[in-house]
Image (tube, helix red, strand yellow):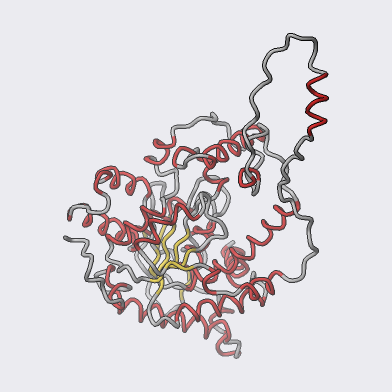
């Protein structure tokens, strides 16, 4: 059985590859980020409409976005995906850790960790529900917030998509104004006199109210089927997610806004965290407990931008623990019931006979969570003698990177990334 599991890991992390064009452009984007001369952090908000509707996080938004989440939640209830009620206390869901962290909260957490304002942050994800309005506070705190449109030209992105058949434009057309003769004819058909006063004119319909993907919300209670243009945009988003996946795996640090949603489906952040753990176990990957983070923000909700020193210390302590073995164990408990891809240890790891056994860590149910690496099969150990060394050379280079990164980290996890970046003297989180 262990051999089948190991084959499953090889397929998941080695055999399955993106298209060569996607890999080439992804590497170019990583090189452009490295050209800035400093490490960069990748952040995935996890603000997806289906996820927000599944957990009932509509009240965290405003205006039309709240209605759109409720429409999608009602549709999930009709389809049997959700067996809960339509209206849910979103603030209670947030306190339970069921809702994503907002970009403003992530920016405050990174500031508390000591990241200066000129830190390069790559915004991953093909779409952030709520639009650019939600990213305004994060951009105000970190000016170097970039995404794929900042690193790639329109030509590069269009070449990745390839030739497409043009679709008819679905621009909203205003109704044709009535002529004077038509108005008189309607008046003559209104009935015998005396007649009541005519109704007041209808409110003018502005084009921006009907343009875009939410133009139907004022006219119908049922969301229409996606148009061909919507389906094409969904296909494009898969390409953008593939690019963001490559960059997030190669980033010096990764911060997930939402993962382990409990729906049973793999999410972007969970897959990135599993890939980073498989390739470089010592990579700087944050695994925050959203329930703990929500409690911390409730403490300083009225003074978020000038928190006290104790609050900053608590945030640092929690996020540093998420980087350590304690964070790995917690991630294992949350990820294993759904998919091993989000936490491929110890299933996708093995040791050669010369390495010593690590101490095993077991959960409450007796299942080994950490440190149960079996000895590698003979065919993997003998591959060096045969001459098949391509994958082994790559793994050896990764091991060297792990050793070097462990030496850089040392006992203090907060200095591995921020030590290479000059701190901003205008803001001190301990003031």
152 left or right, relative to 401: right
Count of numbered circles in the view: 0
Is residue 387 shown above or below 321? below
Quadrant holding the C terminus: bottom left
The image shows residue 265 at horizontal and vertical percentages of 58, 50
Judge by depth and name the residue closer to the eye, 227 or 100.
Answer: 227
The percent position of residue 362, horizontal first and vertical second, equals 38, 54
Taking depth in this image into account, of 380 and 392 the one nearest to the observer is: 392
On the rendered structure, is 260 left or right of 80? left
Q: Nearer the viewer, residue 93 or 152?
A: 152
Residue in view at x 57 percent, y 82 percent: 391
In the image, 147 versus 363, the foreground residue is 147
Tell me the quarter of the image containing the N terminus: bottom right
Residue at left offset 67%, top offset 16%: 197
Residue 403 horizontal side relative to residue 163, left or right: left
Could you tell me which residue is drawn at 57 percent across and 40 percent down? 68
Q: Can you give x and y, in whole percent of width and height, for residue 248 in the image?
A: 49, 68
**Horizontally, is 271 left or right of 360 in the view?**
right
Q: Quadrant of residue 10?
A: bottom right
Q: Position of residue 65 (x, y in %)?
A: 53, 42
Does residue 267 lie above or below 386 as drawn?
above
Residue drawn at x 24%, y 48% as measured from the top left: 303
Which of the 4 quarters of the picture holds residue 371? bottom left
- Image quadrant of residue 318? bottom left
For residue 333, above or below residue 215: below
């Amino acid at each position: 059985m262990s051999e089948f599991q190991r084959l499953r890991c090889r397929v998941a992390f080695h055999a399955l590859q993106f298209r060569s064009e996607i890999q080439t452009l992804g590497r170019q984007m990583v090189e452009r980020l490295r050209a800035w001369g400093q490490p960069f952090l990748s952040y995935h908000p996890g603000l997806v409409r289906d996820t927000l509707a599944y957990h009932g996080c509509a009240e965290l938004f405003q205006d039309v976005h709240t209605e759109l989440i409720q429409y999608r939640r009602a549709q999930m209830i009709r389809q049997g995906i959700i067996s809960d009620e339509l209206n849910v206390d979103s603030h209670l869901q947030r306190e339970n850790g069921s809702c994503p962290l907002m970009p403003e909260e992530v920016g405050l957490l990174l500031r508390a960790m000591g990241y200066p304002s000129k830190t390069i942050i790559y915004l991953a994800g093909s779409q952030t529900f709520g639009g650019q309005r939600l990213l305004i506070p994060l951009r105000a705190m970190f000016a170097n917030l970039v995404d794929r449109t900042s690193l790639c030209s329109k030509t590069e992105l269009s070449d990745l998509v390839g030739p497409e058949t043009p679709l008819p434009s679905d621009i909203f057309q205003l109704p044709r104004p009535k002529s004077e003769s038509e108005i008189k004819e309607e008046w003559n058909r209104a009935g015998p006199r005396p007649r009541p006063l005519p109704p007041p004119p209808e409110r003018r319909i502005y084009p921006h109210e009907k343009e875009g993907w939410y133009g139907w919300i004022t006219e119908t209670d049922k969301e229409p089927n996606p148009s061909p243009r919507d389906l094409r945009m969904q296909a494009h988003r898969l390409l953008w997610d593939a690019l963001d996946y490559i960059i997030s795996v190669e980033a010096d640090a990764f911060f997930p806004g939402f993962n382990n949603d409990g729906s049973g489906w793999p999410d972007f952040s969970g897959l990135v965290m599993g890939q980073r753990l498989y390739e470089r176990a010592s990579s700087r990957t944050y695994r925050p407990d959203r329930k703990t983070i929500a409690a911390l923000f409730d403490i300083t909700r009225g003074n978020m931008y000038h928190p006290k020193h104790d609050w900053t210390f608590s945030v640092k302590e929690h996020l540093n623990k998420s980087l350590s073995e304690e964070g790995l164990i917690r991630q294992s408990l949350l990820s294993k019931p759904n998919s091993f891809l989000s936490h491929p240890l110890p299933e996708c790891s093995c040791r050669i006979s010369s390495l010593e056994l690590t101490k095993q860590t077991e959960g409450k149910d007796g299942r080994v969570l950490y440190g149960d690496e079996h000895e590698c099969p003979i065919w993997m150990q003998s591959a060096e003698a045969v001459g098949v060394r391509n994958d082994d050379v790559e793994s050896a280079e990764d091991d060297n990177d792990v050793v070097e990164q462990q030496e850089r980290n040392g006992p203090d996890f907060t200095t591995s990334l921020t030590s290479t970046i000059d701190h901003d003297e205008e803001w001190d989180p301990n003031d």
